[in-house]
Amino acid sequence: MSLRHFLADDDLTSAEQREVLLLALATKAARHAFRPLAGPQAVAIIFDKPTLRTQASFTAGVAELGGYPMLVDGKLAQVGVRESVPDVARVLGRMTSAIVWRTFGQDRIEEMAAHAGVPVVNALTDDYHPCQILADLLTIAEHTGGLSASGPALAGRSFAYVGDGANNMANSYLLGGALAGLDVRIGAPADYHPNADIVARATAIAQESGGSVTVTTDPAEAVRGADAVATDTWVSMGQEAESEAREAPFRAYQLNDDLLGQAAPSAIAMHCLPAYRGKEITDEVIEGPRSVVWDEAENRLHAQKAILAWLLERREQR
């Protein structure tokens, strides 16, 4: 079996995504029962961008899998500046069992994967946040009746995302949600719609999984009847200089009680954090009875343990 990486959501098939989510449920139920990194084997975890949940969840997760989390400060390592990405990949690949990287361009992590010789996991790039989406799918399953008995993991359920449709979260919701068989709806201002290529990829996946993809400028249309509603910051890392200019177009997309009221009566409210309360989400929603934000944050740990264990198992079968 060839070496596998997790660089974008659709690096998994729909069936494989289901396997990973089942494993995540199992690791959550028996938190210390899975030890594929016993030894301990090291996993390099590199941070080029600010982090809280990614560092905490991967560090704890690698330790709980029996391994040693080798934290690498991207500012000190200067990957791609002080040393080329291929050179760093070859060095770390000989010292570790897997590499996790939170970085900028998608090309960087793809170059790392091409030269590492061990599984590489995308802990966030400018284009995708696939580990967060696995955690979110796990959270939706837990709060909307579990994983489907067969087929795509969340078949028959609907998910809405409102806010910046041109960021990495929207891209990953489209691809990961389509793989799960969700009815995925993106509500965003016209100037902040997802890349057409991403929408086309997600639409093709949805045609196979039985899901669907909708992109609209109407936040109420996106949310209407949805089983889960998510948002994210209007100003992603690196866009701080645009903060004032970006706020006005997004005001109608704030996840507040009125907008959440358009969703299904049992709908859950989600945010990947950090949250800017009073902007993309209100205190009433994030602290309200329909919020599952803290479950969502915890599930980063379980989902990431599952994807690491799944990739490591396939490495051993090479």
Image: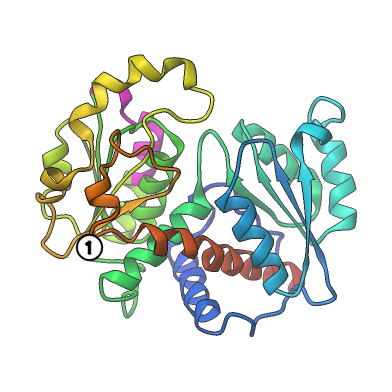
- Residue beneath the point at 40% across and 20% down: 243
Q: Secondary structure at mark 1?
A: loop
Q: Quadrant of residue 277?
A: top left
- Residue beneath the point at 85% across and 76% down: 39
The foreground one among 290 and 11 is 290
The foreground one among 86 and 79 is 79
Identity of the amino acid at label 1?
A: Pro
Residue range in magenta is 190-202
Q: Residues within 10 Å of mark 1 (few under 14, many from 20)?
A: few
Find residue 216 and report its horizontal and vertical position in percent: 19, 34
- Residue beneath the point at 79% across and 35% down: 85
Q: Can I make out residue 155 in this image?
A: yes
Is residue 191 located in the magenta-colored stretch of the structure? yes
Find residue 223 and report its horizontal and vertical position in percent: 16, 47
Find residue 256 and report its horizontal and vertical position in percent: 19, 43
The foreground one among 265 and 198 is 265
Instruction: From the viewer's perspective, tell me whether residue 132 is left or right of residue 199.
Output: right
Q: Which residue is mark 1?
A: 289
Q: Can I make out residue 184 in this image?
A: no
Find residue 282 and report its horizontal and vertical position in percent: 25, 42
The foreground one among 21 and 252 is 252
Is residue 47 located in the magenta-colored stretch of the structure? no
Instruction: From the viewer's perspective, tell me whether residue 305 is left or right of residue 9.
Output: right
Instruction: From the viewer's perspective, tell me whether residue 20 is left or right of residue 291.
Output: right
Above or below: residue 69 compared with residue 278: below
Quadrant in which the N terminus is drawn: bottom right
Above or below: residue 24 compared with residue 100: below
